[in-house]
Amino acid sequence: MRLLGVFAQTEPILLYGSRVVVRTPRGQEVGTVRCEATPEMIAKLDSGFVEDRIVRVMTETDEAEYQRLRKREQNNFARCKEIIQEMGIVMELVRVERILGGERIIIYYTADGRVDFRELVKVLTGEFQVRIEMRQISVRERIKLLSNIGDCGREICCAHFLHEMPTISIKMAKLQRVTLDPSKISGHCGRLKCCLRYEHDRYLEEQKKCQTTDSSLGE
């Protein structure tokens, strides 16, 4: 899910974009260095894996293993989907993720309400012979996980840099006087576009200025 976190390191200074192997509560994973963990940047994070660490800079062996797991995920996804259909469980499989260290497989899915997947976990554990972790995600998170290109021609914000989903309402669209056509103001997830939030505060400021000016003229 492209989690952001704070990681301790023993390596020399790492540059932006460096690929590294990190230790998280899920096991060993591949990570990308975004920036130095300054107090200012840490303050912007709601939470972080502050006790976790960078194990090493990614090696050719790590990269080969990572690519091998990505290929296995495709086959695992197809098999997992077959099992879900055979068991008649009402849920949409989104992605099957294999952790680099091989400790577990994470199954991402969407569903209306809660799903009793206890029997499914038993079957999948026997099928793949690793620990299975089920994670129900929202419609927005589904799009974030799959990653797409937005109408602007760039990677969608939630998959690129947003680490939390902003609150968005139709009032924001009305204030900015954009079209209220759902096909124009909705993202791939079917919800209002996140970018409606970016200029909202500025519009509120300008609205207050106009109201203040009108009051002054009235006096």
Image: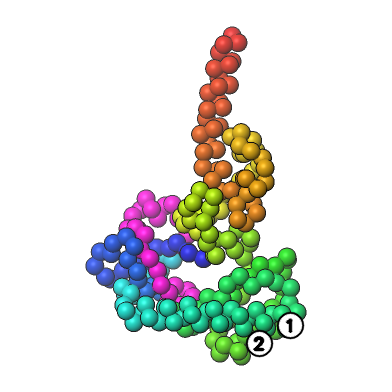
What's the residue at 60%, 10% (across, down)?
A: 218
Residue 74 is situated, as x and y percent measured from the top left of the image, at 54, 78
Label 1 or label 2, whichever comes before in sequence order: 1
213 left or right, relative to 49: right
Q: Which residues are magenta?
A: 24-48
Q: Badge 1 is on which residue? A: 87
What's the residue at 56%, 90% (across, down)?
A: 129
67 left or right, relative to 105: left
Name the quadrant containing residue 203: top right
Q: Secondary structure at mark 1?
A: helix
114 w.r.t. 195: above or below: below
The amino acid on which the numbered mark 2 sits, given as a three-letter code, is Val
* Contact flag, marks 1 and 2 (Cβ < 8 Å): yes
The amino acid on which the numbered mark 1 sits, given as a three-letter code, is Met
Name the quadrant containing residue 120: bottom right
Label 2 crowd bin: few (<14), some (14–19), many (20+), radius 10 Å:
some
Res. 32 in view: yes
Q: Badge 2 is on which residue? A: 123
